[in-house]
Image (cartoon, rainbow, N blue to C red):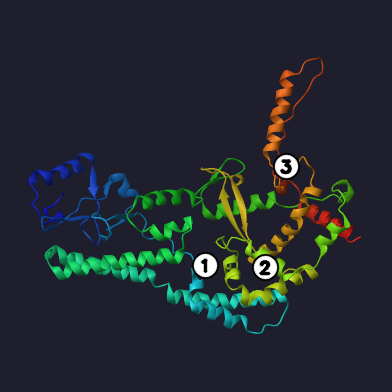
């Protein structure tokens, strides 16, 4: 303790206890940070008497004060613990928060207002192609759901702040009247109200692991501190090395470096003419050709949709598989017509083909753009089309893929090639005679980055023309 005012209730502070921390600060050339708002960080009811103390504090040295002259320190409210958390903000004048993209929440299905919004907007007549109709109606639904969500759930943060202000007011009154039954009962009800709001927030955000921060992040717990460290190190790209080993730390330059490197890495090169199909793929039977080229059915579209995980991150439009699965009885005519039109005419709306790129680090401490793997967040209509193609090709993969390709094929295992390699190397060690044997280890990029997409396009065009005879 530094001052007698750092404690209320209980036995008075002795001079020796007051000088102990003061002498330490003087010896270490440190300073006690100024606190705004609540003063006390610990409370307890001892023998019928309520005691408040300032046990937790932030200490600064001269160097820290020069680095963070505009720091901000405040103490949190007492909730489920007898200790309150201490919040330190070293840069209160941070950049304004960027707007977040729209995402449909699976929990919205439990509200009748959501069903009314979808039914109302889906009945609106729209002129245009089938895909344009679906895209236009989704935009209308997005606007109405944004307004409804802001009105229904957007006040959570303001309610939590009002609860904190009331807790601060009651705690200040309790320091003067610690035995007041009315104030203690009021304080208890405010804490219960805060817990109910957190439980509602947990039900709203769901049980996904990556949502735990939004549910438990504001609470004074071990999860809070571990998450703070993990998110700061993994959630931001503060610096990166270019091709010459020079470190870049300015955000605009980092963005330009990623765009340049990924553009050069994934840009197509001049493509040779597609080889004859017979040289690459074995011939398929007429029954297999008919299976691949049969018209798309509504049941096939529904099967592809409901095979998707409803909790996966949505694409640019914000509507994941959960939205289409929950309202399938309403959306089925237009969605099926849009997907059938793609397979009939081979044209896709530009908005449907838009994707978000998420950079996933391959290493714990990435230092170059090659240490990040770009993941495409596609729209659900695009995923349905791709899923239909996969479902049709899956039964035929065993017939058209060479037996030595053991990965990503049903009923085959990549471990077979590993065991085969071990057997070959063991055979080399025990071979006798004058013959020489050589083993070559060939490291190459992934096939998707080394081969051109235009090459595959010509190859599949040749496949379709061959199948159609």
The residue that mark 3 highlights is 406
Residue 302 is tagged as 2
Residue 320 seen by the camera: no
Query: Is residue 185 positioned above or below 418 on the image?
Result: below
Q: How far apart in space, not on screen, are marks 3 and 1 (Cα)?
A: 37 Å
Q: Residue at x 69, y 49 (%)?
A: 265
Say few, some or many: other residues with alpha carbon within 10 Å of mark 1 (under 14 / 14 to 19 / 20 or more): some
* Side (left or right) of 301 relative to 458: left
Residue situated in front as seen by the camera: 460 or 325: 325
Quarter that holds the C terminus: bottom right
* Side (left or right) of 6 relative to 467: left
Q: Are marks 1 and 2 in contact (CB under 8 Å)?
A: no
N-terminal label among 3 and 1:
1
Place of residue 282 in the rendered image (x, y in percent of width and height, measured from the top left): 86, 48
Place of residue 129 in the rendered image (x, y in percent of width and height, measured from the top left): 73, 77
The residue that mark 1 highlights is 106
Say few, some or many: other residues with alpha carbon within 10 Å of mark 3 (under 14 / 14 to 19 / 20 or more): some
* Side (left or right) of 74 relative to 181: right
């Amino acid at each position: 303790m530094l001052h007698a005012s750092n404690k209320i209730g209980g036995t008075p502070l002795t001079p020796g206890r007051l000088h102990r921390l003061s002498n330490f600060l003087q010896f270490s050339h440190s300073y006690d940070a100024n606190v705004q708002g609540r003063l006390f960080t610990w409370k307890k009811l001892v023998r019928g008497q309520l005691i408040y103390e300032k046990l937790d504090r932030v200490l600064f040295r001269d160097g820290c004060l020069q680095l963070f002259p505009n720091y901000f320190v405040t103490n949190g409210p007492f909730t489920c613990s007898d200790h309150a958390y201490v919040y330190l903000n070293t840069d209160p004048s941070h950049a304004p928060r960027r707007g977040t993209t729209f995402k449909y929440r699976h929990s919205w299905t439990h509200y009748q207002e959501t069903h009314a919004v979808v039914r109302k907007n889906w009945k609106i007549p729209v002129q245009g192609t089938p895909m344009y109709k679906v895209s236009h109606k989704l935009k209308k639904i997005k606007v109405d759901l944004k307004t409804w969500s802001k009105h229904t759930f957007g006040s959570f943060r303001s309610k939590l702040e009002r609860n904190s202000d009331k807790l601060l007011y009651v705690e200040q009154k309790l320091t003067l009247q610690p035995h007041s039954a009315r104030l203690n009962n009021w304080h208890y009800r405010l804490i219960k109200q805060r817990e109910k709001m957190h439980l509602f927030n947990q039900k709203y955000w769901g049980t996904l692991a990556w949502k735990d921060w939004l549910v438990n992040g504001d609470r004074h717990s071990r999860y809070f501190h571990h998450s703070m460290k993990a998110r700061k190190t993994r959630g931001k790209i503060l610096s990166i090395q270019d091709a010459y080993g020079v470190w870049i730390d300015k955000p605009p330059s980092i963005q330009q470096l990623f765009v340049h490197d990924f553009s050069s890495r994934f840009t197509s090169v001049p493509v040779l003419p597609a080889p004859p199909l017979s040289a690459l793929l074995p011939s398929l039977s007429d029954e297999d050709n008919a299976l691949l080229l049969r018209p798309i059915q509504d049941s096939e579209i529904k099967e592809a949709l409901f095979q998707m995980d409803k909790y996966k991150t949505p694409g640019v439009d914000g509507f994941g598989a959960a939205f289409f699965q929950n309202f399938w009885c309403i959306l089925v005519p237009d969605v099926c017509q849009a997907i059938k039109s793609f397979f009939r005419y081979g044209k896709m709306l530009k908005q449907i083909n838009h994707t978000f790129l998420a950079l996933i680090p391959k290493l714990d401490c990435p230092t170059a753009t090659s240490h990040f793997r770009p993941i495409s967040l596609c729209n659900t209509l695009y995923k349905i089309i791709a899923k239909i193609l996969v479902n049709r090709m899956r039964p035929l993969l065993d017939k058209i893929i060479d037996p030595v390709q053991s990965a990503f094929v049903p009923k085959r295992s990549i471990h077979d090639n590993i065991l085969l390699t071990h057997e070959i190397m063991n055979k080399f060690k025990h071979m006798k005679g004058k013959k020489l044997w050589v083993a070559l280890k060939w490291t190459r990029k992934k096939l998707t980055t080394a081969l051109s997409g235009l090459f595959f396009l010509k190859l599949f065009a040749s496949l379709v023309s061959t199948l159609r005879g």
